[in-house]
Each structure stands twice: as structure tokens, then as C-alpha cells.
Image: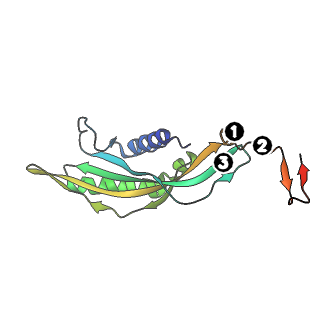
Amino acid sequence: MIDFENVRNTIVKALKEYLGCEVVLANQTAPIPKYPYVSFSVTTPLVANGGTWGRCDDGKDRKQIEQIWSITVQSDNTQESVDMCLKAYNWLDHIGTQFLSDNKIVVQRLENITNRDNLLSVYYEYRNGFDVVFSLMDEINVNEIDEGEIETIIIGNKEGMEVIT
């Protein structure tokens, strides 16, 4: 099973360190960080891709899955919002790819950066963001699968039955 919390913590910690600002889960009832900051939401925790499981020599079955995140940079300055968003985009697109790969996370696809400004009562909160598709490996230990054991097989029809044990 994928350790979604570890995946989330790995990505968030690295982005926070690279960007030098807070990276927080969106839509929370918590104080808003000081500008600029990045919010994220996992819009699709698991994309049903229809792939098949593969048995590996290390005793695990694995299947590639995808997870979709929405990343948004918030600021009280429009240029700062754009610049931070480009910085986050470039980290996911190139700079951080080796780090992510070392942690079994692959950036499969990045979507367009779009304006996500928001009018807050009498002033704007400047927002720019994009979606990112991560590729992950789901895994199950083979010993968790009860495959059972076939003890007897009957081959043939009524006249010529052969029992193999």
C-alpha cells in the first residue's frame, strides 16, 4: 500500500525548503500564513488507470498509479505570486526531479500555470497555480495475498479421470 502521508510530507518539505515559504494544505481551518505562501490540495488521491499488478523478486506485487495535486501560490503582490509559482513549477519540472525520484515519486505531467486571483472583501489576493500529476508505485507484500494451495486436481472426463496430487 502506498504511504500517502510519507509522499505528501516528502513533497511538502522539499518545496518549502526550496521556495523559502510555508507550504500548507488548502481548505483548512487554521490561521493563514504570511505572504507569500503555497497551498496544495490532493484533488485525486488515486487515478484508476486500469493497469495490472506485477510480481517482483523482492516479494512484492507492484502497480503504477497516479495522484493529482493542485498547487497555488498566494501573495499580496501579483509579480511575487507569478515568480514563486514559476519557481515551484521549475522545481517540479526539473530541479527537484532527482530528489523526487530518489523517494520513488515521479512527476508524470505538469499542467499550465493559470491565474487564480481571489477578491477578499475589498482587496485582491493574487494567486497563480497549476496541477501536477505524480506517478507512484502501489505495492502489496505477496504474503498478504491468500492464494491458497491446490492439493488435488482432477483432469479429464467421467471415463478417464486422472487424479494428480
Q: Around disc 1, counting alpha carbons within 10 Å, would you say few (fewer than 14), some (14 to 19), or many (20 or more)?
A: few
Q: Position of residue 29 (x, y in %)?
A: 25, 36
Q: Amino acid at mark 3?
A: Asp
Secondary structure beneath dot 1 equals helix
Instruction: Judge depth for marks 1 and 3 and give the one in front.
Output: 1
Q: Residues under labels 3 and 2: Cα distance? A: 19 Å
Name of the residue lying farthest toward the left = 122
Q: Position of residue 27 (x, y in %)?
A: 28, 43
**Mark number for residue 149?**
2
**Residue drawn at 89 percent across, 49 percent down:** 164
**Mark number for residue 143?**
1
Counting the numbered discs, the total is 3
Name of the residue lying farthest toward the front = 159
Secondary structure beneath dot 3 equals strand
Describe residue 129's horizontal placement relative to residue 48 as left or right. left
Give the mark nearest the N terminus, 1 or 2: 1
Name of the residue lying farthest toward the bottom = 112
Q: Position of residue 45 (x, y in %)?
A: 44, 49
Q: Amino acid at mark 1?
A: Asn
Give the mark nearest the N terminus, 3 or 2: 3
Secondary structure beneath dot 2 equals loop
Q: Residues under labels 1 and 3: Cα distance? A: 10 Å
Give the mark nearest the N terminus, 1 or 3: 3
Q: Around disc 2, counting alpha carbons within 10 Å, would you say few (fewer than 14), some (14 to 19), or many (20 or more)?
A: few
**Residue drawn at 37 percent across, 46 percent down:** 19
Where is mark 3, residue-wise?
61
Check contact, mark 3 vs mark 2: CB within 8 A.
no
